[in-house]
Amino acid sequence: VPACGFFIRNQMLLKLNMANPQAGTQKTIEFDDINKRRLFFEKSLGQEVELDAIGPEFKGYVFKIAGGNDNDGFPMKQGVKTNTRVRLLLKTGHSCYRPKRTGERKRKSVRGCIVGDDIRVISLVLVKKGEQNIEGLTDTFKPKRLGPKRASKIRKLFGFKKTDSKELIKKNVIRRTFKTAAGKDRVKAPKIQRLITDARIKRKAQLKKLKKERGAASEKAAENYQQLIDDFRKSKRAAEPKEKKEVKPASTTAPVKAKEVKAKPATTPAPAATATKDKKKK
């Protein structure tokens, strides 16, 4: 009986994974109250939900439903307008499916995008902050461990213009400090990608010049080779002795006339009908 009660409680348990992208934090809560669970019923992926009924600390908070799983672990798929599980033929580019071979398609079971009683996990994203701070979600800030590497993303992060100097980007790149195995502090910076420097411009000009020189040399080599072939043919023709061509006399034989075929006269059949009439008269 206790095991059965534990199973029923797990069937009614709902887990909320709440995320705050601005602060880089995440918090998970669980409850089995049916009144709190009804707050999410008939809501679909992408809809916003107010969590005032969950507790006083959530007053004024608005979250967006980003995903979820049912009691068997099947994920919710956007666009499937049902609150049951369905089987769909999925291919490359579809959510809830990762192909193992190129061009592979497979029929997979997915959960519809409408929240029902069988949903056990719901992923939420913070849209609007409420009156109070939630411990572990809005009262702390966790910065990213690594910063951007691409030059355009560094400019976007710090508000630099494209005409700004390259040294400004190199100076403001995000560095991280760590300790080595020997216990020394070390500062490490990422290698900036797609940064157009003076050395890169010079190298590109050299490659362009080299490509042009190779093309000109190839054209000149082709002309020299063609001239060599022409000279060889001329010398070969000059070395050959000139021979007079024999003119064949015209044929004197008369053309053969076709034989005339005489047409045979058409034969007329014997009058059989008149003979039968004479026999009847007799």
Image (cartoon, rainbow, N blue to C red):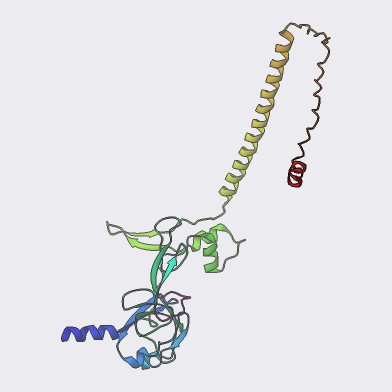
Farthest-out residue, front: 282
Left or right of 7 in this view: 85: right
**Quadrant in which the C terminus appears:** top right
Q: Is residue 191 visible?
A: yes
Farthest-out residue, left: 1
Percent x, y of residue 242: 76, 7
Percent x, y of residue 256: 81, 16
Instruction: Give 205 or 30, whichever is nearer the viewer.
Output: 30
The stretch in magenta equals 76-84
Q: Is residue 145 visible?
A: no
Percent x, y of residue 255: 82, 15
**Quadrant in which the N terminus appears:** bottom left
> Is residue 268 positioned above or below 276 on the image?
above
Instruction: Name the chief secondary structure element in magenta.
Output: loop
Instruction: Give 197 or 53, whichever is nearer the viewer.
Output: 53
Q: Is 146 inside the magenta-drawn segment?
A: no
The residue located at (53%, 60%) in the rendering is: 151
Percent x, y of residue 19: 40, 78
Instruction: Give 41 or 155, whichever is nearer the viewer.
Output: 41
Left or right of 14 in this view: 43: right
Give residue 124's quadrant in the image.
bottom left
Give residue 54's quadrant in the image.
bottom left
> Is residue 163 positioned above or below 39 on the image?
above
Give residue 257's quadrant in the image.
top right
Q: Is 81 inside the magenta-drawn segment?
A: yes
Instruction: Give 276 or 9, whichever is nearer the viewer.
Output: 276
